[in-house]
Image (cartoon, helix red, strand yellow):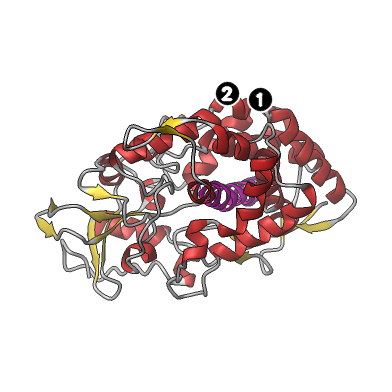
């Protein structure tokens, strides 16, 4: 039941059927229950663009320290320092500054030739086939291959890293995910870190290990091994899922809009904005969780301190108050600003890399496959709460 009306609208973030198409429910939430309370799962949510944006900016009242995923907050997981997206205050500033120095937009732009080579080589393999799975055979491969290159992970180990990242994000359909320490502490990467201590290279792992910073106590030092492992777990896990779903969503929405796909195939200069429109229209992350650092008044209701609170980014992306005709996909839309990468001090540091991978993957795909058809009976949606996208998207090439 909503907190502000007698509406019977119900939002269950674990409902797999709802995940297939959440937008009618999001629309009802915006209209009938802009502040929503779910008693069964004990969380509050806002769905309008202005409310979501305001909450993401207000890191004093809407806190990330207990996690940015609903299950993390409700399981009362103790977050290790260095997870960045969960850090707050001065420690967040310190950790973000450190990662910003090794993950700059300029450095991401400089790797475009390597990203293009990775995409082209994989697509050339698929070119000989009349049917392939856009997710399994392409979209899942690209982000982890790029991260493997950036992190200095040997080629022969990258598939194992990809599988580890996928397993770490798996949730049983219809149920909250249960998190454990190994997923947060990054122990899987221990051997890679040990190797880079002995054999530094020109890669993100080496830069993380040997870049000096001033810590909370004013001591100038480098990261400890445990801190570096947490960083790597965050970088590899966060970048893998959201980016592979972006690459998959471009295939889906352009198959649904073949005229616009034809425009992009003929004019690649339109592709960057098409990527932005895909990020708005089908955001990989439909919700960002916060916990309240104090009582908050919204829509005449008092939300108690400590409450779990969802910012429904997927709903904000289709809010009529922010976008004209928001349920229409339009590669020519003047988007301005969207919330898919978050907002404020916790804006996604990997946004430049995700945009680069999404753009290059689409450019190279359209060069080889100006048309494709989706097997809609065989496509299958993933099950992780708040991360919406396909785990299988079979396509045929005319």
Residue 276 x, y percent position in the rendering: 52, 36
Please tell me how crowded label 2 is: few (under 14), some (14-19), or many (20+) other residues with Cα within 10 Å.
Answer: few
Residue 234 x, y percent position in the rendering: 51, 50
Q: Identify the residue under disc 1.
A: 110
Q: Secondary structure at mark 1?
A: helix
Judging depth in this view, the residue of 350 and 25 nearest the camera is 350
Q: Examine the rendered structure and indicate whether residue 384 appears above or below residue 157.
A: below
Residue 15 x, y percent position in the rendering: 43, 72
Is residue 33 something that shows in the picture?
Answer: no
Task: State which region is magenta.
Answer: 231-257
The residue positioned 83% from the left and 42% from the top of the image is 121
Res. 40 image quadrant = bottom left
The residue positioned 54% from the left and 27% from the top of the image is 105
Q: Examine the rendered structure and indicate whether residue 109 appears above or below residue 95.
A: above
Q: Identify the residue under disc 2.
A: 106
Circles 1 and 2 in contact, beta carbons < 8 Å: yes
Q: Is residue 129 left or right of residue 104?
A: right
Judging depth in this view, the residue of 115 and 313 nearest the camera is 115
Is residue 373 something that shows in the picture?
Answer: yes
Q: Examine the rendered structure and indicate whether residue 95 appears above or below residue 139.
A: above
Quadrant of the rendering where the N terminus is positioned = bottom left
Residue that lies at the very extreme toward the right in this rendered image: 128
């Amino acid at each position: 039941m909503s907190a502000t009306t007698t509406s019977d609208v119900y939002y269950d973030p674990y409902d797999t059927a709802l995940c297939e198409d959440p937008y009618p429910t999001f629309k009802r939430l915006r209209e009938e229950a802009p502040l929503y309370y779910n008693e069964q799962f004990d969380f509050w949510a806002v769905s309008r663009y202005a409310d979501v944006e305001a909450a993401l900016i207000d890191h004093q009242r809407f806190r990330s320290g207990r996690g940015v995923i609903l299950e993390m907050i409700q399981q009362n997981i103790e977050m290790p320092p260095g997870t960045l997206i969960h850090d707050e205050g001065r420690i967040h500033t310190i950790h973000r500054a450190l990662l910003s120095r090794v993950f700059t937009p300029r450095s991401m732009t400089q790797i475009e030739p390597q990203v293009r080579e990775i995409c082209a080589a994989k697509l050339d393999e698929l070119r000989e086939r009349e049917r392939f799975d856009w997710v399994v055979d392409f979209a899942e491969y690209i982000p982890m291959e790029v991260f493997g290159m950036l992190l200095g992970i040997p080629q022969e180990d990258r598939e194992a890293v990809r599988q580890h990242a996928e397993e770490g994000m798996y949730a049983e359909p219809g149920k909250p995910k249960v998190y454990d320490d190994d997923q947060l502490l990054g122990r899987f990467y221990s051997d890679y870190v040990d190797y880079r201590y002995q054999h530094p290279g020109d890669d993100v792992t080496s830069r993380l290990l040997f870049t000096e910073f001033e810590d909370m106590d004013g001591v100038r030092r480098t990261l400890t091994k445990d801190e570096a492992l947490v960083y790597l777990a965050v970088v590899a896990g966060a970048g893998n899922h959201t980016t592979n779903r972006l690459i998959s969503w471009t295939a889906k929405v352009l198959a649904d809009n073949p005229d616009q796909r034809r425009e992009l195939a003929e004019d690649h200069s339109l592709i960057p904005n098409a990527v932005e429109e895909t990020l708005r229209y089908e955001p990989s992350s439909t919700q960002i969780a916060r916990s309240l650092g104090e009582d908050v008044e919204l829509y005449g209701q008092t939300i108690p301190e400590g409450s779990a609170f969802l910012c429904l980014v997927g709903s904000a992306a289709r809010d009529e108050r922010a976008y004209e005709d928001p349920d229409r996909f339009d590669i020519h839309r003047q988007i301005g600003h969207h919330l898919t990468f978050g907002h404020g001090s916790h804006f996604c540091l990997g946004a430049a890399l995700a945009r680069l991978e999404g753009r290059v993957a689409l450019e190279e795909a359209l060069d080889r496959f100006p048309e494709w058809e989706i097997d809609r009976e065989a496509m299958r949606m993933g099950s992780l709460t708040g991360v919406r996208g396909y785990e299988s998207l079979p396509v045929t090439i005319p």
